[in-house]
Amino acid sequence: MRIGIIGAGAIGMLVGAYVKEKDIEVTFYTRREQQAKALRQKGLTCIKKKKIHHYSVDAVSLEEGLGQFVDILFVAVKQYHLSNIQEYLLKARCETIVFLQNGMGHVSFIESLPQTNIGVGIVEHGALKHDDTTVEHTGIGMMKLGTIKGDISSLAYYTHESFPVVYEDSWKEIMGKKLMVNAVINPLTALYNIENGGLLLNVDYHVVMKQLFNEVFDVIGSGEREEEWRHICMICEQTKRNRSSMLRDIDNGRQTEIDAILGYIVNEAGNKNISIPVTMCMYHSIKGLERQMNVHSDVKRKEVFQDANK
Ligand SMILES: NC(=O)C1=CN([C@@H]2O[C@H](COP(=O)(O)OP(=O)(O)OC[C@H]3O[C@@H](n4cnc5c(N)ncnc54)[C@H](OP(=O)(O)O)[C@@H]3O)[C@@H](O)[C@H]2O)C=CC1
Ligand SMILES: CC(C)(CO)C(=O)C(=O)O
């Protein structure tokens, strides 16, 4: 059995570490040959509950790995990088592909792929990449799997006491719920520059969080509003030390996944004719930060804010 993982970032390395716990061969397909070499030489390090664990893994650049057979392929690049690896995915020699991206904009693309089993994995864990070979598991949550085509239910086997994996029948429901989590936590933590837990500790931020949640629920919510709200607060608590992926993107002067997350909500609200002023404000605030960073080419958050205060 061999598992392939495209993208050795925070989530790719975290999944790789827990697959290795099952003593299964893991190959990373990286964008940079330099990272592949480091992983081959040093192995993968995962920090869990302050303890350091090492795993030996294989790694090659994606270009070099094109054509290798793997049983299961996890795709752990950002949502907006999927288009760059489209050609590879169309040719990937594997039976099963699982996509781990936040947001919902990519579903129509993945539905069109030729492999037999295609699914999504919704990651509610916190993960922090320290360097090209090291990841820290910063928040224990759950990985929920759902099938889009074929059947990926057997992957629930990868469950671990510190990395619970569950299979659920409706991919739409789990993706919708995760979208709601990311739509509320990610933009607010990115704008306020706080860890996820900060949204529970600061009463004023908590008020805005509830307003944003109510609008997002009006647009894509199903089930009980209060239950959904409690679920999002619980994720904040479980990942309280985590800097959300959007906050880290802003910190590092990178593009965020705002279009896949709030962009999707904005489109849906337009289709349903629902007014969402708080959501629009958050969407444009993140887009504005991205724009400012592009203008200043690869500047870090501190410089952006210094500049904005002039
Ligand atoms: N981090 C977290 O706590 C969570 C993240 N997620 C979601 O998981 C997904 C991945 O996020 P995350 O791991 O944080 O992101 P990272 O930026 O840490 O990792 C993305 C990885 O993809 C690699 N990559 C980009 N393009 C290619 C390519 N063409 N070929 C091979 N590799 C490529 C990047 O390589 P390079 O370094 O060379 O650019 C990078 O290593 C996102 O959709 C995110 O929203 C979900 C839940 C929690
Ligand atoms: C669950 C959460 C909010 C963890 O930080 C996440 O998915 C992210 O950061 O993108």
Image (tube, helix red, strand yellow):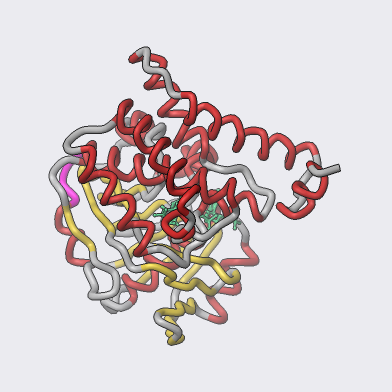
Residue 39 x %, y %: 54, 73
Residue found 26% across the figure and 32% down from its top = 221
Q: Where is the N terminus found, in terms of image quarters?
A: bottom left
Query: Where on the picture, by quarter, is residue 264?
Result: top left
Tell me the magenta residue range. Answer: 148-152
Find residue 231 and report its horizontal and vertical position in percent: 27, 51
- Above or below residue 266? Residue 188 is below
Looking at the image, residue 35 sits to the left or right of residue 148; the answer is: right
Q: Is residue 151 magenta?
A: yes
Whether residue 92 is visible, yes or no, is yes
Residue depicted at 51% across the width and 33% down the height: 259
- Residue 117, percent across and down? 22, 45
Pick out the residue farthest to the front.
Answer: 203
Position of 58 relative to 282 (above/below) = below
Q: Is residue 301 left or right of residue 172?
A: right
Image height of 163 relative to 11, above or below: below
User: Which residue occupies the foreground of this view, 46 or 112?
Assistant: 46
Residue 229 relative to residue 16: left or right: left
Outermost residue, right side: 310
Confirm whether the magenta stretch covers residue 167: no
Task: Tell me which secondary structure the magenta stretch mostly adopts.
Answer: loop
* Residue 90 in view here: no
Q: Is residue 149 found left or right of 24 in the rendered image?
A: left
